[in-house]
Image: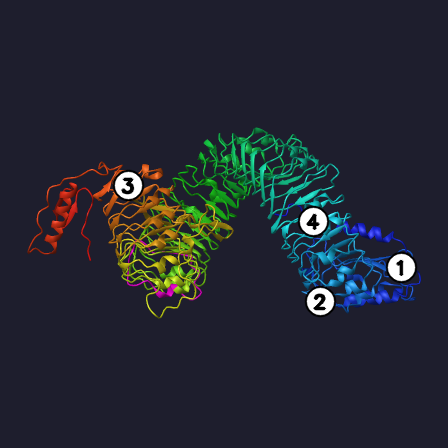
Amino acid sequence: MELIPFTKSMAFSFWLLFLCADNPLSTSSQSTMEDQIDALLQFKKSFSLNATASTDHLSHPKTASWSWSSLDQKNRKTSSCCLWDGVMCDQNTGLVIGLDLSSSFLYGSISSSSSLFRLVHLQMLNLADNNFNDSEIPFSIGSSLSNLKSLNLSNSGFSGQVPIEISRLTNLSLLDLSGNSLTLLKPDLLTLVQNFANLKQLVLSETNVNSVVPGSLANITSLTNLQMVSCGLYGEFPNQIFLLPSLQVLRLSRNKNLTGSFPRFDSLSQLQDIRLQFTSFMGKLPETIGNLASLKILALGVSGFSGPLPDSLGNLTGLSVLDLAYNSFQGQIPNLSGLTRLTHLNLEDNQLKGEIPPLTGNLSQLARLFLRDNELTGEIPSYLMNTTQLTHLDLSGNQLRGSIPNWFSRLINLESLLLGFNNFAGETEIDTFLELKKLQTLELSNNGITLLNGRNNSRKTNESFPDLSYLAMGSCNLEEIPYFVRYQDQLSTLNLRGNKIQQLPNWIWNVSTSTLTVLDLSSNSLMHFLNERSDVLPWSNLRQMDISNNQGLSGSIPMPAPFMVLYQASNNNFTGRIPPGICQADSLQWLDLSDNNLIGEIPQCLGNLSSSSLTVLNLGSNNLEGSLSVEFSKGCKLKMIDFSHNRLQSFVPRSLENCSLLEILNLGENLIDDIFPSWLGVLPLLQILILRSNRFHGSITVADDDTITITNTPFTNLRIIDLSHNGFTGALTSEFFRNLTSMKNDTGHEMRYMETMNIDGIIFSWYDFSITLTNKGVFTLYGDILYELVAIDFSSNNLEGEILETIGNLEMLKLLNLSNNDLNGIIPESLGKLKNVESLDLSNNQLTGEIPQKLVSLTSLSVLDLSNNHLSGQIPRGKQFNTFPVDSYIGNPGLCGEPLSVKCGEVKTTAAPPPPPSNGGDDDLLMWVIVSLGYASGLVVGLVGGQFVSTRYGFRRRKR
């Protein structure tokens, strides 16, 4: 956010005065006034005048009055152009030494052959705020105008490479090339400035510099103004530049790869304006920052600063703007009572604690106060009632308590008031805020307040209320939509989620019909949604609608508005089929109809929608059926697909190969009858694959036939794979596990959510997506999928062979479940390398041998299940193994030691088992095996409904 726009006219007014008083040029100059007039008129003729070419509100066509007719017609040689608008001449010689054509509506191209470059005595040239139609900067500026001291070409539609000839203008005191589409490579930044010994102002913002900042800039002691905003700077900024004796303005914002830190400041500094937003500057603010007595603007938002805020900030008595937002500042807000000129204070999104301190002794000028998303406590301080000039107040996202005071009605200049996501309590009258006639934004959501819906029936027109554009009253214990909403015709956002609203009033369909873009009625108790008179939504520009979690909503799914980008209707009781007309909303990016009672097939048109806009498609937990035959188009943009918990049949559609951006695929809990779709390995970003509880069969391999060509290593980004409760057979293959690169290495991710999406400026993560995995012995629902969740669940299949040593290389695994298979052999010692594993379930297999001692090193392990195998030997002890219960080991007659009651070395005598049947079938033989096991371990077994069941250990006979 640009806090105070940079005005260049003051600087050039100074130059006009300075140059007029400069030493006179030689009277022997060969230039004549007639030559100058002719050059200026030719220059004028080379452009058209277009009002759209300039943006300044004081713009006017300065060259329009230039003509021969305005001069002395009797003696053209003595006629003077010095009175023409924008033209400045030397008082003694009459030579044109200054040309200010800024904001003059000039439109057209300019070249090095322009008559402009015949004005060789120019010392000041200002062509800012025109449109030179993507021309390159003429090299003649540097080669012909060698006397230039001030050159301003800002915001004039220049493009291409900055000519090296500009670096030869050794007299330059001011150079402004900002706001164009220029590149500074040849010359580079170092070459450009190395000859500018007298430079005072260097403004290159929005120029593609793409380099480090040369330390030689610190040698230009005359520098007063350095601006290189959004220049692609990188590396460490030389902090000696902060200490230049004349430097007043330093703006380096929006160079995200530029690092640096503050030096120690002395009291001689002239700095007035420091802006480092959106950079990677870091470290603490030094206590010596309080020595910057002239400082007016300190803007460091969205950078890497940390540590406590120094108390010396309170010494900056001239400070008007303090922006420290989106850093990692900690501790309490210091006493800023000396900042009597403060107009803008932004400390949002830090880690500040404690109560809101007295901010200033005189709050008469404070207009913007942003403290959101910290850890502030206490009540809203009463002195804020004196901030009568306050226009924006944001205290949301803290831990503030108490009641919301009614004196907010006194802050008559408020345009934006955000108090949501705190711990406020008690009753609050809506009428408190309706007195604020300038109010446009009101956020009260997610507190503990009860919002009282006052009813002043004498106020029946929209003139009685503020014209709100954003209204959020989520979780305010509302039982009906407040009456004043009826009179709002400018709303863009209406958020009433998490209340107790049961019915929508009839007038809601007439509210802000042409302006509403976001409607959130989720998590209420609505019984009906659509207007009885029409099934078409009345909001023509609606882009986001959330009516999820209203379990009373039933009937057909409401059709989305034509321009809708986000549509959530999950967790309701909608019935019927998904209407194909839903695809007419061809801007949809997020469609969630999960957890309803929808039937029928998935509309084919959704496959086509995936190539135009659709990114998230969630139809899970319905009663959808039929063949899963959706054809996903080439150029498919889907990142997440969830068709789980339905009755879908047939095969996994091969057209998913077109969805190269896919991160999450959940087809679990269906009736899909297919082999393992190894061709999904072509999807380079696939992270989560859920196929649980279907009818998959065959082996789990990297490729299933010779027709598949996978150019890159398959499944390298896979972090969660759940193939449990299917009919997979065969042995585990080393090739499959070797490819799981993301499970092997810590990529440096901190705890954060999966890929996010920006929809209309609002950031969404996969918060609506959840998966179910067997963890800690139970089925666990995971919402908010974290990068750190790395899991393999192959349980309840018919897998055979040994557990592979290569699984031990998957060091990022947190959950490994291979239970309920026919795996044999020993537990490989390499599993001791799974340093992050929290749940390890190998139960109900045919494993033999001893429990590896190396498993004791798994200090993150909280759940271990090795039950119902053929393991033997002493159970390891130490660390986590001292915490596991007896259930972790039961069903292994050869195991001994704690926590089992069987001591190692103890001789056991058991009754002889009955002889095996001589003529019995498979069932008789299986019965003998189980009864024999019962003799050995004391199990009680029985035959129930033709199935063998153990009442203690849960043995079962698997279907083949």
Between disc 2 and disc 3, whose residue precedes? Answer: 2
**In which image quadrant can residue 888 be found?**
top left
Contact (CB < 8 A) between labels 4 and 1? no
Residue that numbered label 1 is attached to:
94
Q: CA distance from mark 3 to mark 4?
A: 74 Å
Q: Residue at x 47, y 38 (%)?
A: 421
Give, as a single range, the part of the protein colored magenta: 631-656
Predominant SS along the magenta part: loop
Question: What's the residue type where badge 2 is placed?
Answer: Ser
Residue 265 at what x, y percent from top left?
A: 70, 39
| SS for dot 4 | loop
**In which image quadrant can residue 45 be found?**
bottom right
Between disc 4 and disc 2, whose residue precedes? Answer: 4
Q: Which numbered disc, 3 or 4, marks the residue closer to the eye? A: 3
Residue 525, placed above or below residue 144: above
Q: Residue at x 41, y 47 (%)?
A: 784
By what rule are the colours in the image chosen? rainbow
Residue 440 at what x, y percent from top left?
A: 55, 43
Residue 6 - label: 4
Residue 559 falls inside the magenta stretch? no
Residue 5 at what x, y percent from top left?
A: 67, 48
Question: What's the residue type where badge 4 is placed?
Answer: Phe
Q: CA distance from mark 1 to mark 2?
A: 29 Å
Contact (CB < 8 A) between labels 2 and 3? no
Task: Identify which residue, 69 or 101, lies in the foreground.
Answer: 101
Residue furthest to the left: 919
Residue that numbered label 3 is attached to:
875
| Crowd band around label 1 with a 10 angstrom C-alpha radius: few (<14), some (14–19), many (20+) | many
| SS for dot 1 | loop
